[in-house]
Image (cartoon, coloured by chain):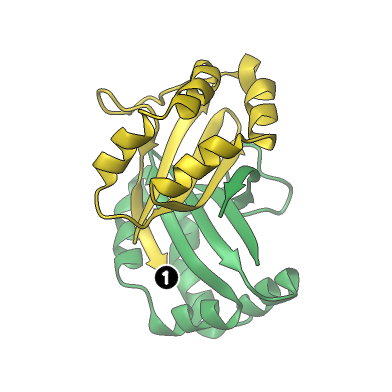
Chain colours: A green, B yellow
Amino acid sequence: MRRIAQVIRVKPEKLGLYLQLHKNPWKAVSEQIERCNIRNYSIYLFGDQLFSYFEYVGEDYDGDMARMATHEETKLWWSLTDPCQQPVEGAREGEWWHEIEEVFHQD
Amino acid sequence: MRRIAQVIRVKPEKLGLYLQLHKNPWKAVSEQIERCNIRNYSIYLFGDQLFSYFEYVGEDYDGDMARMATHEETKLWWSLTDPCQQPVEGAREGEWWHEIEEVFHQD
């Protein structure tokens, strides 16, 4: 299992929409997340930052993320959520959510 | 089980010390964290922010946190780590680590 944490910004004028969408997640998207081997997935809000934590239980993270991006309902979902977000300063070229460094872990 | 995420700032000039301490956690402190019903505890670094995620499996969070603060080795540990940190803007009165809002979760 690999733990992953990421950050992204939410556009303040889109925060209400983002929160409302995430109060009503789509079943098809949840199922795709599950199929792509993501577990225990949480998103937190701090100011205009979103902080996510999840556990990847598969064996091909890049492959599973690429597979996620081929799923029709997931693409539709992202067509709503992506305009609510923008990468943080410090994101790498091509990154959307920016992966951050684990500095401590205790089971 | 209750999931908790928190944020605090790290003083840039103290980052090296903070990271080095957390590469070498003290066994007595880890045991106290365990006794106080904290599980799956991770800390991440983003810029000068630290994000923590953990799962509380007890039934008296405030009581357990108060108990944590009576433990001699933990107090000694904090005497080293506290000077590395400062609360974020937006922290509530008396908060050290600032608890942030969960906006999505999927098991």
Residue A43, how many percent across, how many down? 43, 56
Of residues B66 and A102, the one nearer the viewer is B66
Q: Is residue A8 above or below residue B72?
A: below
Q: Specify the amino acid type for callout 1.
A: Gln
Q: Horizontally, is B21 left or right of A39 in the view?
A: right
Q: Quadrant of residue A69?
A: bottom right
Can residue A10 be seen by looking at this rendering?
Answer: no
Quadrant of residue A101 within the rendered picture: top right
Image quarter of residue A59 = bottom right
Instruction: Identify the residue position indicated by label 1 in the image.
Output: B106
Estimate the x, y position of residue B22 in percent, counting from the top left: 63, 34
Q: Relative to residue B3, is residue A32 depicted above or below?
A: below
Q: Residue at x 45, y 51 (%)?
A: B54
Q: Which chain is disc 1 placed on?
A: B
Q: Quadrant of the N terminus of chain A?
A: bottom right
Q: How many marks?
A: 1
> Along the horizontal axis of the image, is A59 left or right of B90?
right
- Residue drawn at point x = 63 percent, y = 81 percent: A70
The structure residue drawn at horizontal position 50% and vertical position 27%, both measured from the top left corner, is: B73
The quadrant the C terminus of chain A occupies is bottom right
Q: State the SS at label 1.
A: strand
